[in-house]
C-alpha cells in the first residue's frame, strides 16, 4: 500500500488504513479522513509539505507527518 504523501497530484485514492495512535489518529478522523473515504490530491507544496486534498467536499491541507500515517489505494 502507498502512503498519502506519495500520491500523484490529480489522482483520486481511497483510504485503506490510518496507522497513527491516540490523539493524532483521532484528529485525522475528526477531519473526515476515515477508512473507505475517497481523497482527491489537489496540490503538493514544492518541498512536499503540506499536501492539499479534497475530502468530503472541502479542501484540507495536511502536514507530511500526518499524510505519512495514512495508507491509500489508487482508485
Image (spheres, rainbow, N blue to C red):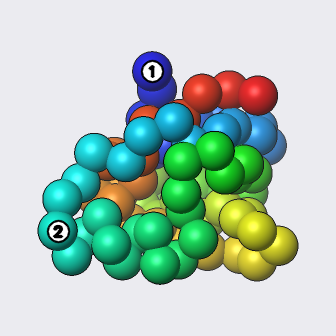
Above-or-below relation of 39 to 17: below
Indicate the secondary structure of the residue bearing disc 2: helix
Q: Which residue is at 47% across, 78% downward?
A: 30
Residue 63 visible, this orientation: yes
Quadrant (top left/top right/bottom left/bottom right) for the N terminus: top left
Figure label count: 2
Above-or-below relation of 31 to 70: below
Quarter where residue 47 is shown: bottom left
Quarter where residue 53 is shown: bottom right
The residue where tag 2 is placed is 22
Above-or-below relation of 11 to 48: above
Q: Which residue is at 53% across, 57% downward?
A: 34
The residue where tag 1 is placed is 1
Q: Which residue is at 68% across, 26% downward?
A: 74
Residue sitting farthest toward the left: 22
Q: Residues within 10 Å of mark 2 (few under 14, many from 20)?
A: few
Q: Earlier in the sequence, mark 1 or mark 2?
A: 1
- Residue 9: give x, y in percent of width and height: 70, 42
Indicate the secondary structure of the residue bearing disc 1: loop
Above-or-below relation of 33 to 41: below
Amino acid at each position: 500500500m502507498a502512503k498519502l504523501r506519495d500520491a500523484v497530484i490529480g489522482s483520486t485514492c481511497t483510504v485503506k488504513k490510518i496507522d497513527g495512535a491516540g490523539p493524532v489518529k483521532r484528529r485525522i478522523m475528526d477531519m473526515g479522513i476515515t477508512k473507505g473515504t475517497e481523497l482527491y490530491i489537489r496540490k503538493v507544496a514544492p518541498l512536499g509539505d503540506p499536501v492539499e486534498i479534497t475530502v468530503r467536499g472541502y479542501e484540507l491541507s495536511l502536514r507530511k507527518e500526518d499524510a505519512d500515517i495514512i495508507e491509500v489505494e489508487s482508485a
